[in-house]
Amino acid sequence: TDLAHIRNFSIVAHIDHGKSTLADRLIQSTGTVQDRDMKEQMLDAMDIERERGITIKANTVRIDYTAQNGEKYVLNLIDTPGHVDFAYEVSRSMRAVEGSLLVVDSTQGVEAQTLANVYQAIDAGHELVPILNKIDLPASECDRVAEQIEDVIGIDASGAIRVSAKTGVGIPETLEAIVHHLPPPRGDERAPLKAMLVDSWYDAYLGVVVLVRIMDGRMRRGDRIRMIQTGATYNVERIGVFRPQMEKVESLGPGEIGFITASIKQVRDTKVGDTITHEKRPCEKPLPGFKPSVPVVFCGLFPVDSAEFEDLRDAIEKLALNDASFSYEMETSAALGFGFRCGFLGLLHLEVIRDRIEREYDIELITTAPSVVYHLFMKDGTRRDLHNPADMPDLTYVDHIEEPRIKATILVPDDYLGDVLKLCQDRRGIQLDLTYAGSRAMVVYDLPLNEVVFDFYDRLKSVTKGYASFDYHLEGYREDNLVKMQVLVNDEPVDALSMMVHRDRAETRGRAMCEKLKDLIPRHMFKIPIQAAIGGKVIARETLSALRKDVTAKCYGGDATRKKKLLEKQKAGKKKMRQFGKVDIPQEAFISALKMD
Ligand code: GDP
Ligand code: MG
């Protein structure tokens, strides 16, 4: 296909505004997939994505479209990940295309992820086609939302296409707009090969599959290629396009998007954003702006049943095969035994991996408090990265500590603004901006990532009854007065409950934690002191009083089956408990104790 007849685009939208449904309609109405083969959400492959309604990995489809002027076009749609954790992958896939459909739910309006994603599209130099979706619903307010798009995003929305991705209204107009309003790709077929590595994943039959966008030159089956950032070389074995199932082609030229396989061993060997060229005739400069995605949130994953450690290792290794941004190493904890310290791109990423281990591999997990990566500046002038509060060295060696900060954008109806400001303030936030878009406020905060990783999003949802939307990106590191707080149960430190806190908040956090643990730990035959401490200094303390009598005592002489049931119940409860010295701590204590309300 000549460049003038190619259009490459993505769809940007807030979650639930109809991105996947619109993609389905575009695929279906062009006959790319026969009606009888049509499943809902064609591009959302993994179960967990379907369930949560989020797209985690970029997916792509090539659509043949004959326009109303009779010309035949090839449209390549890249479906980008919809969540902030995958911001870098979003920005890469955006750079692989020239335009975006900006989908806004006309019953809702612009939300935080609409903004975050549309700014990424604008940064990537995209032309935008605004689309007002869900016009079949009575609550649809196209004029108001179009005005809001103009006010908040600052683009002309007077020609916004009114669509119902559900009924198909506006789909022909959308296809025409893609062809007439989005620019064709540029590129030089005679120049040395320059292709972008947009994404990669592990396929059980094919091994590692790499999604590529050709910028210049032509890639053919059998070519010897080099990945510029990793330096590795491979032979291209298969080359093809997605319709959306894989279909072989002989070669891919400028402007085209497709996949290759090349006997690449692991997804880890491919770096999203890398430049692929020919070994023999390489391009002069790699594509700009390459930065590997690095994990920012760490936590420990331990099997509840320590006999399942090997199963857990197996599960983690399998998951890591397909997810290069997920890192892990073995960890031993005095309290929890053998497990893994794992790194994630963000909280959602953590949740997805944890859920998959529990559901797909049927392993019950204890997850320790998520922690961010702190920079420790040592008195000897060196810098250390702290991934686990348990590894915090003695403070006398530490000069100062820096923590990661984020810039968070929150959109919220006026009525809840006060609660949102209070929440952000409570989490050591610094307000950067406050503006209005209709009856919604848009606040921008500088917040420590540490205060956001655990339950910020849940709290935000609950104080705003679900009406707030939230998005963030990492801004950088800043020094603050941070200390490690330890928790001692029956005078034994429980390393899995150690955390880094701001000095000014330590007492409050410590007190709250001790009070919670007092409720969460069952009473034993003896008194149990529960303490929070910084260094050797106790800053909060509670005492769990002793149990007076045996739980089965009341059954003596009574119903034997009832007694047996009670003991069985106790045993089942035990399974989820961990012993710390002489004390059993239930699994949920680790999570609950760390939540701040
Ligand atoms: P995504 O998160 O942006 O991919 O959104 P989805 O495509 O998964 O859509 C979210 C929900 O909105 C689903 O329940 C869809 O069925 C529904 N939906 C999408 N488009 C329309 C539409 O035009 N009209 C109506 N009534 N519902 C829609
Ligand atoms: Mg979706």
Image (tube, grey):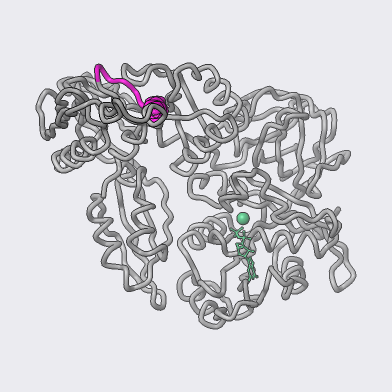
Q: Indicate the position of residue 2 as horizontal and vertical percent values.
A: 84, 55
Residue 256 falls inside the magenta stretch: no
Where residue 503 sits, quadrant-wise, is: top left
Relative side of 176 to 573, left or right = right
Q: Main secondary structure of the magenta part?
A: helix
Q: On the rendered structure, is 425 left or right of 311?
A: left
Which quadrant of the frame does ligand 2 lie within? bottom right
Comparing 156 with 592, the one in front is: 592
Which is nearer the eye, 356 or 226? 356
Q: Which residue is drawn at 80% across and 60% down?
A: 4
Residue 125 visible, this angle: yes
The answer to whether any part of residue 300 appears in the image is no
Is 492 positioned to the left or the right of 127 in the image? left
Picture layout, residue 302 above or below residue 455: above
Magenta extent: 564-582
Residue 167: image x %, image y %? 72, 72
Residue 518 image-quadrant placement = top left
Image location (x, y in percent) of residue 296: 41, 36
Residue located at (24% from left, 60% from top): 422
Position in image of residue 147 (x %, y %):
51, 79
Tell whether position 581 is magenta.
Answer: yes
* Residue extending farthest front: 557
Q: In this view, does 338 lie above or below 43?
A: above
Q: Is residue 337 above or below residue 128?
A: above
Residue at the outermost bottom position? 143
Image point (36%, 21%), residue name = 336
